[in-house]
Amino acid sequence: MVSFSYAFVLVLLFGGSIANPVDPHQNKLDVNHKKPLQTFRPYNVAHRGSSGQMPEETTAAYLRAIEEDADFIEADIVASKDGHVICFHDVTLDATTNIADRTEFADRRRTYEVERVNMTGFFVVDFTLEELKSLRVKQRYDFRDQQFNWKYQIITFDEYILIALYADRIIGIYPEIKNPVFINERVKWSDGKKFEDIFVHTLLKYGYKGKYMSEDWLRQPLFIQSFAPTSLIYISKMIDSPKVLLIDDTTVYTQDTNQSYDEITSDGYLAFIRRYVIGIGPWKDTVVPPIDNYLGPPTDLVARAHALGLQVHPYTFRNENKYLHFNFHQDPYAEYEYWLKEIGVDGLFTDFPGSLSNYQECRMPYTQKGRTEPPLAGDGKHAEE
Ligand SMILES: *[C@@H]1O[C@H](CO)[C@@H](O)[C@H](O)[C@H]1NC(C)=O
Ligand SMILES: *[C@@H]1O[C@H](CO)[C@@H](O)[C@H](O)[C@H]1NC(C)=O
């Protein structure tokens, strides 16, 4: 069960923006008496919230994920034309909002080059926060529940943080510095500030800080993620919170350094980047490339990352049959079993955090382990360096 400040949730669910976000330090958020983050088993990261059920990156998706016992709620952070940071996955509004129905914005359609591909649509960076707040969002996939379409708004990075801070147990956040090269090209802030500065400033404002497993971190758990290594290196001077380098298909090139992810996953590069990051977040097919919808032989990426003391949090786990390789007999628990027991990863990004927490409660129940106990042998979880 989750109890929130009721008025706060009403504001988030039924519209209106929070003009003056409550300063958590002046409120009785009382983290000392909350159920702590579990750290004895791999992390359940709710990918864009409980996005399998609710429209992604909405208050409803995040509240559902918290009810379902996720450890972290995950978000993509991009910026509006007027420099506000918001939770939204795509650089364009087309796939998951009602922008097409808003004829007053018809002339905002543009073509921009994003990560070396020309894209056409209504770009987030061409709309002010007020305009973005006037839109409503929908479920991304047509094979998922459509009944929540057009009920929810885009939320800001601040509102997302407040959802975590107001939960009645400790819930971590896992925000991504999304498309930083493109955002910095298109959005300008005063004093020459960059997207990454605004991103970190928002976290610092709410008291996020501290190395992995430090007291500060356990009070307000945070992983910062990005596909752009230079963004993670840049912010390492501003915030000591743990960072995770995302890894795409090995054929893709990084948006900032134009390195192939083949190069990024080399021993030499991993040994370099571990000075800045606590772990990597690879696409699961990069770890275990499939062949004809069956699992192929696993690569040695997890073993090499673990040898360097790096955690591995692969993405994205989804319950639907179309995403389950035939080895798993259409059973998402069998997929979790494989990744947690055979591959030995340290966290998973899932669209269905409720299924992952049910699986984990069957296999590694919370009640039998205190958070101070050492990790189980062979579960792939590594202590901090
Ligand atoms: C995108 O379109 C512009 C204008 O037509 C062109 O100059 C550019 O080369 C294109 N970029 C890519 C990556 O195709
Ligand atoms: C990125 O690197 C690839 C491979 O080295 C090269 O072919 C390509 O021209 C580079 N692209 C840019 C934009 O530098």
Image (spheres, rainbow, N blue to C red):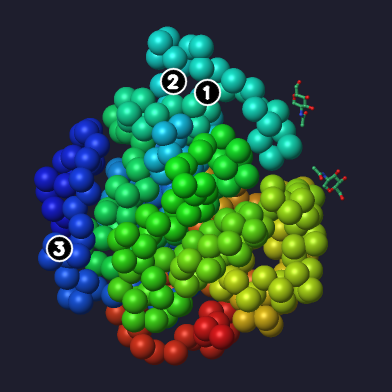
Question: In this orientation, which residue lies closer to the viewer: 119 or 370?
Answer: 119
Q: Quadrant of the N terminus?
A: bottom left
Q: Which residue is label 2 attached to?
A: 99
Q: Is residue 42 above or below residue 132?
A: below
Q: Secondary structure at mark 3?
A: helix
Instruction: Tell which circle, 1 or 3, labels the residue nearer the N-terminal end.
Output: 3
Cα distance in 3D space between marks 3 and 2: 38 Å
Label 1, secondary structure: give it.
loop
Q: At label 3, which amino acid type do we have?
A: Gln
Residue type at mark 2 is: Ile
Label 1 or label 3, whichever lies nearer to me, is 3
Q: Is residue 172 left or right of residue 297?
A: left
- In percent of width and height, residue 3 lies at 16, 57
Nearer the observer, disc 3 or disc 2? 3
Q: Position of residue 376 (x, y in %)?
A: 49, 86
Figure check: 77 above or below 383: above
For the point 69% across and 47% down, which residue is it?
255
Q: Badge 3 is on which residue?
A: 26
Kind of residue indicated by mark 1: Phe
Q: Which residue is mark 1?
A: 122
Mark 2 nearby-residue class (10 Å; few <14, some 14–19, many ≥20): many
